Amino acid sequence: MNTTMSTIYLDYAAATPVDPQVLEAMEPFFVEQFYNPSATYQAARGVAAELKQARATVAHWLGARANEIIFTAGGTEANNLAIDGILRQYPNGNVVVSAIEHESVLAPAHQFDCREVSVGADGLLNLAALENAIDENTVLVSIMYANNEVGTVQPLKEVAQIIARKRTARKSKLPLYVHTDACQAANYLDLHVSRLGVDMLTLNGGKIYGPKQSGVLYVGAHVKLQPQILGGGQERNLRSGTENVAQSVGLAKALDLAQSMRHEESARLSKLQQVFIEKLEAVPGVIINGSRKKRLPNNVHITIEGSDNERVLVQLDEAGILAAAGSACSASNEEPSHVLRAMGISDRDAQASLRFTMGRQTTLEAVTKTAATLQQLIARK
């Protein structure tokens, strides 16, 4: 990581450092194996074989077939392809999303007839409201697996059960698909699409110690999408353009590492999370946001009553601690977080909230120092 030895990095939900093994896997495709995988000569066929293997690796962890894996330039593109690719086919159809989706789901969804479903104070989806929101014209439901701000893990299996009932009772001939944004989940949770009950799933390499601007959209073979990028017909005719082999190979390696170590790393981070939360709860004026039980093991989201999160972040930065006020994608937006608003947190408290997300380099010493530093800053305000 490009930080000094004294720097404590606690913004892994925004970006992760590329794993050395990932970088090593990518390097040959920048200079030595630069060939276009669509070319017919032997050297290019070798590159095409490596791309095929990367696709198979991703498919393995999703319990999918290789031809159901579409490589994209990040999670945002994958989310847009999933939503736009379905809704453009059905002008009278509608899409149902949760109120705490990432902007890359909300923005394209609101280009169409979109219904937002509420969440509770803990950030968990209101399942009854979801069931009521789905009607005869609903063609897509998009519910994120784990929230990027407060780390809440949504009950996707229960969502899938609701969808199954709706499909059975449906009188219209319209399809009803389920998509999940799993960008934050891939380091810690099971991604098997059949067990989750989803038709489409989004991944982001930049969140799993892979390269930025690398992503995946799993598209079940039964799902028909309209492409957003037309041309040469690559990626199952859904995303034309010469494949970025280095990025795809890097993402596949990163996913392989993340899923192979997810149980061990989740257990390690859960212990650090518990210590961190216990220390923060002992500080007057600190409130822990989000579900305690259904939560990613690396996420600690707090409100410091009466504080200004921008000022606290600057003070933390000066102390060598890098954290965030919320989603990095909306960091330049002065509006309070739509996620916290949906959870019933006031705008004032939302602007007094901080997100700490841990990762592979996070230590007990780091969370202990961060908690102590926060306590000092709060005592001085």
Image: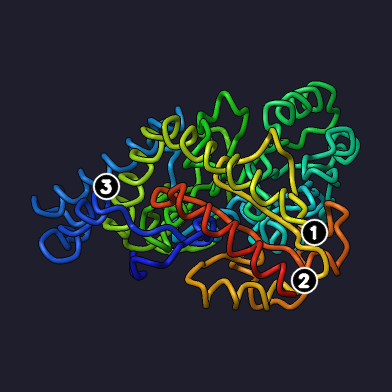
Residue at numbered disc 3: 51
* Corner quadrant of residue 284: bottom right
Q: Is residue 224 visible?
A: no
Q: Is residue 21 visible?
A: yes
Q: What residue sits 71% from the left and 56% below the top?
A: 302
Query: Which disc number belongs to residue 285?
Result: 1
Q: Nearer the viewer, mark 1 or mark 2?
A: 1
Estimate the x, y position of residue 26 in percent, counting from the top left.
23, 56
Q: Secondary structure at mark 1?
A: loop
Q: Nearer the viewer, mark 3 or mark 1?
A: 1
Residue at numbered disc 2: 307
* CA distance separating discs 3 and 1: 52 Å
The amino acid marked with disc number 1 is Gly
The amino acid marked with disc number 2 is Ser
Would you say 376 lies left or right of 172 here?
Answer: left
Would you say 265 lies left or right of 336 here?
Answer: left
Residue contact at pointers 1 and 2, CB within 8 angstroms = yes
* CA distance separating discs 3 and 2: 49 Å
Report the label total.
3
Q: What residue sits 28% from the left and 56% below the top?
A: 245
Categorize mark 3 by other alpha carbons within 10 Å: few (<14), some (14-19), many (20+): many
* Corner quadrant of residue 341: bottom right
Q: What residue sits 80% from the left and 42% below the top?
A: 138
Give the vertical position of 14 relative to 82 (above or below): below
In-front residue for pair 267/223: 267
Q: Secondary structure at mark 3?
A: helix
Give the vertical position of 289 relative to 243 (above or below): above
Residue contact at pointers 3 and 1, CB within 8 angstroms = no
The amino acid marked with disc number 3 is Leu
